[in-house]
Every structure is written in structure tokens, then in C-alpha cells.
Image: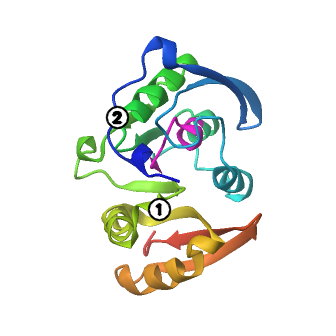
């Protein structure tokens, strides 16, 4: 399995768009996907585990889908918390274009699909959801997580879904030692070969 979809790609042309019917936030919706992104055929297994088992998001605040792809987590957050601001962040411009299209089609103006550099440095997050790109390698993955998880607001939470056989348990251990003092990392669940990790920021 390659990792091309984790990095910059041009937006899909109209002829490359694919319509997919998926269930998000308990409702059936039609979304656009395309080749050259992660999970173009619908909601991948890991994301489905997080969407099923993570607690409902807060009704308001600033939320983050880290590594958004075509947007299943960001769209779910916005559907469940329409008054929140939802950042959908990815390095793949094709994915961001699809996330924007899908948010517009579902009338979700709170979704901001942007590159990492386009998120203002002062923004903090009440909740982060992520199916992190394990296959990019530890160095890139660790840099990404240490760049974003400390931006949780006091008392904020992050929920990460990681495949067990791709190092979920070792990642949990590493996070517990690498994050700043006061952050608490634990396993919140396990389903279908995936671990659901919870990161709690101090304060609140």
C-alpha cells in the first residue's frame, strides 16, 4: 500500500469525482470522493470504529479532524455540533477540495478544510479526532502528533484510532512519555483490530 495519498495532489476534475452513499451521524448522506486520497470508496474500518465508539462531541467550541481525507470525521463533527467550528486538516489538496465540496453539499458552514499551515497558530481545540497516517513512518507521525495534541484546550480530549498490528500499543506508550507533563494517555477501547486511544489535556 503506497502513501501517495498522504501528500499533496491536485484537486479532482469533475470526471474523477465519485458519489458514495455513507452513514454519518446516524443519517445517510451522499458524498464526493476521488482516487488519490485515503479510502476513496467510503468510510474506512478504522474511522468507522472511532465514529461508533467515541463520545459525542461538545455542541460548541473548536474541533479538529486531523488528516481529514474526504471528510468523514469532520462532517460527522459538524452534523452533530452545527454551532462548533470544525477544522478539517490535511496535506493533500485533493482531499481538502473534496472535504469542502462535501461540507457545502451538506450545508455545514462551520467546516474549515485547510492545510496545516492555514490554521492560525493561536487556535486551540476542545476536541481532536484522528485516524493518523501510521504508514508515513514514525518520524513524520511523531512530529505531527507532537505538533497538534499539545494544542488541546485545557481539559480537551483527543481520540485516535490506530490499527493494533501497526503499532497502536507502542504508540500509546510513546505518547505517554512524549507529551508535556499533565497529559494523560489511555486505551479507551478495542474493536475489529483497532485500538481507540484517548488523550486528555490537563486543566479544565
Residue 158 vertical position relative to residue 75 in the rendered view, above or below = below
Residue 55 vertical position relative to residue 169 in the rendered view, above or below = above
> Within the magenta stretch, is there residue 66?
yes
**Circle 2 residue:** 9
Would residue 138 be found to the left or right of residue 19 on screen?
left
Which type of secondary structure does the marked residue at label 1 adopt? Answer: helix
Q: Position of residue 17 (x, y in %)?
A: 53, 19
The structure residue drawn at horizontal position 47% and vertical position 27%, both measured from the top left corner, is 98
Would residue 95 be found to the left or right of residue 186 on screen?
left
Q: Alpha carbon of mark 1 to alpha carbon of mark 2: how far?
A: 18 Å
The structure residue drawn at horizontal position 52% and vertical position 28%, both measured from the top left corner, is 34
- Magenta-highlighted residues: 65-75
Residue 41 vertical position relative to residue 117 in the rendered view, above or below = above
Residue 63 vertical position relative to residue 193 in the rendered view, above or below = above
The structure residue drawn at horizontal position 64% and vertical position 38%, both measured from the top left corner, is 80
**Circle 1 residue:** 135
The structure residue drawn at horizontal position 61% and vertical position 24%, both measured from the top left corner, is 31
Mark 2, other Cα within 10 Å: few <14 / some 14–19 / many ≥20: some
Q: Position of residue 191 (x, y in %)?
A: 76, 66
Amino acid at each position: 500500500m503506497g502513501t501517495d495519498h498522504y501528500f499533496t495532489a491536485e484537486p479532482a476534475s469533475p470526471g474523477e469525482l465519485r458519489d458514495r452513499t455513507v452513514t454519518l451521524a446516524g443519517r445517510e448522506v451522499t458524498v464526493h470522493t476521488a482516487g488519490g486520497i485515503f479510502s476513496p470508496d467510503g468510510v474506512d474500518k478504522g474511522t468507522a470504529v472511532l465514529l461508533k465508539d467515541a463520545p459525542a462531541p461538545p455542541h460548541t467550541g473548536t474541533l479538529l479532524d486531523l488528516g481529514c481525507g474526504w471528510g468523514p470525521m469532520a462532517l460527522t463533527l459538524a452534523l452533530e455540533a452545527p454551532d462548533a467550528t470544525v477544522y478539517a486538516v490535511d496535506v493533500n489538496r485533493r482531499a481538502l477540495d473534496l472535504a469542502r465540496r462535501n461540507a457545502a453539499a451538506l450545508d455545514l458552514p462551520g467546516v474549515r478544510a485547510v492545510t496545516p499551515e492555514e490554521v492560525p497558530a493561536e487556535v486551540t481545540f476542545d476536541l481532536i479526532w484522528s485516524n493518523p497516517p501510521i504508514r508515513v513512518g514514525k518520524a513524520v507521525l511523531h512530529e505531527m502528533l507532537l505538533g497538534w495534541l499539545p494544542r488541546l484546550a485545557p481539559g480537551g480530549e483527543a481520540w485516535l484510532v490506530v490499527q493494533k498490528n501497526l503499532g497502536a500499543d507502542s504508540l500509546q506508550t510513546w505518547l505517554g512519555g512524549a507529551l508535556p507533563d499533565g497529559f494523560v494517555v489511555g486505551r479507551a477501547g478495542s474493536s475489529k483490530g483497532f485500538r481507540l486511544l484517548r488523550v486528555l489535556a490537563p486543566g479544565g
